[in-house]
Image (spheres, rainbow, N blue to C red):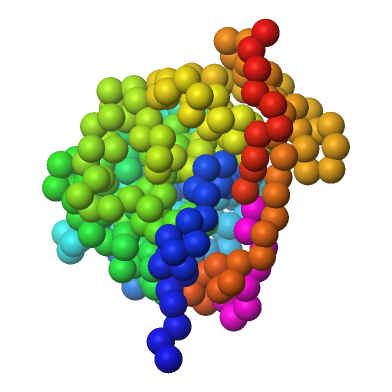
């Protein structure tokens, strides 16, 4: 009997997608054409010395490291690396010719010209999870066709069962269950300052409880602006329950709920696990 893929199980169960963006404020992106092993940084063409150094440098600023590659074949010439600061909505691109140039990235003092232009990263890390490759590669190709130079395949970003996963940087917005036919439209809307709410997982600069509060208010009002309902405060008031104050006077209490899945949550996992989602306790405006 063929085992159900994790993304198929997610769709069958109707797992809720909102408030699932992992909290990340900084990324280090390194262009490294594949193949990538399950642990991309350590199982790629990068030497162990470089992988160790990059890991240590990123840890000093609390950054997540992603390998990136262009959809299709990569041509000759210098490769790129970038530092991303989602809270400042800035990224800095740099070039390198030799892997040893990555031994001193100078992350505390960003190099390169800062940019606010959105770049689109699609997880296609098939050695980490099959669904990411099967569902992600067509999405990356579709974005590359409309935004050449700004669309990348990337290594594991989290939430395999939501494949295809799209990460928009430097803003830190995560989208899931993206189809190739919808990808360009999501990017068009984003560049116009609007969010695709049904596919929005959340923004990585905010904790999950705040992501959930934003989701519930957006669902109520229909407002899709990128910067709508910025969190003002998040206070834990009980076990798995938070009070969140949002801009424009919204006060939201959210509760985390855990349910056991009927299948593993990733293609590599062997046993089912708990699924977390949030429910609104109260949503009101001052």
Residue ranking furthest to the right = 238
Res 75 → quadrant = bottom left
Q: Residue at x 48, y 43 (%)?
A: 201
From the viewer's perspective, tell me whether residue 238 is left or right of residue 225. right
From the viewer's perspective, tell me whether residue 148 is left or right of residue 228. left
Residue ranking furthest to the bottom = 1
Majority SS type along the magenta span: loop
Q: Is 161 drawn above or below residue 267 in the view shown?
A: above
Res 205 → quadrant = top right
Q: Is 129 drawn above or below residue 140 in the view shown?
A: below
- Which x, y percent locates residue 167? 41, 45
- Which x, y percent locates residue 91? 42, 33
Residue ranking furthest to the left = 145
Q: Residue at x 64, y 43 (%)?
A: 278
In this view of the protein, can residue 25 be seen by the observer?
no
Q: Nearer the viewer, residue 193 or 102?
A: 193
In which quadrant of the rendered image does the N terminus lie? bottom left
Instruction: Report the span colored magenta.
Output: 269-276
Res 92 → quadrant = top left
Q: Residue at x 32, y 30 (%)?
A: 190
Q: Is residue 275 magenta?
A: yes
In this view of the protein, can residue 120 be seen by the observer?
yes
Number of numbered callouts drawn: 0
Q: Is 174 drawn above or below residue 75 in the view shown?
A: above
From the viewer's perspective, tell me whether residue 33 is left or right of residue 142. right
Q: Nearer the viewer, residue 268 or 281?
A: 281
- Which x, y percent locates residue 284? 65, 17
Q: Residue at x 65, y 40 (%)?
A: 279
- Which x, y percent locates residue 286? 67, 8
From the viewer's perspective, tell me whether residue 257 is left or right of residue 91. right
Q: Nearer the viewer, residue 147 or 93?
A: 147
Q: Is residue 286 magenta?
A: no
């Amino acid at each position: 009997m063929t085992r159900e893929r994790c993304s198929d199980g997610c769709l069958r169960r109707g797992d809720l997608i909102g408030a699932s963006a992992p909290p990340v404020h900084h990324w280090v992106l390194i262009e490294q054409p594949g193949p990538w092993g399950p642990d991309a940084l350590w199982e790629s063409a990068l030497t162990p010395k470089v992988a160790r150094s990059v890991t240590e440098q990123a840890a000093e600023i609390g950054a997540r490291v992603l390998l990136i590659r262009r959809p299709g074949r990569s041509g000759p010439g210098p490769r790129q690396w970038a530092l991303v600061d989602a809270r400042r909505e800035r990224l800095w691109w740099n070039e390198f010719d030799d892997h040893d140039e990555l031994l001193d990235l100078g992350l505390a003092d960003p190099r390169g010209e800062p940019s606010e232009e959105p770049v689109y990263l699609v997880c296609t890390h098939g050695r980490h999870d099959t669904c990411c490759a099967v569902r992600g590669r067509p999405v990356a190709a579709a974005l590359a066709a409309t935004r050449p130079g700004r669309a990348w395949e990337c290594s594991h970003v989290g939430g395999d069962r939501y494949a295809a996963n799209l990460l928009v940087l430097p803003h830190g917005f995560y989208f899931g269950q993206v189809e190739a036919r919808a990808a360009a439209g999501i990017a068009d809307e984003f560049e116009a300052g609007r969010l695709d709410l049904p596919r929005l997982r959340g923004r990585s600069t905010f904790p999950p409880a705040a992501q959930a509060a934003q989701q519930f208010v957006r669902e109520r009002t229909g407002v899709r602006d990128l910067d709508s309902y910025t969190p003002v405060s998040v206070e834990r008031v009980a076990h798995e329950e938070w009070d969140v104050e949002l801009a424009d006077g919204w006060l939201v209490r959210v509760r985390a709920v855990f349910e056991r899945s009927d299948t593993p949550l990733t293609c590599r996992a062997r046993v089912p696990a708990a699924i977390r989602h949030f429910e609104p306790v109260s949503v009101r405006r001052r």
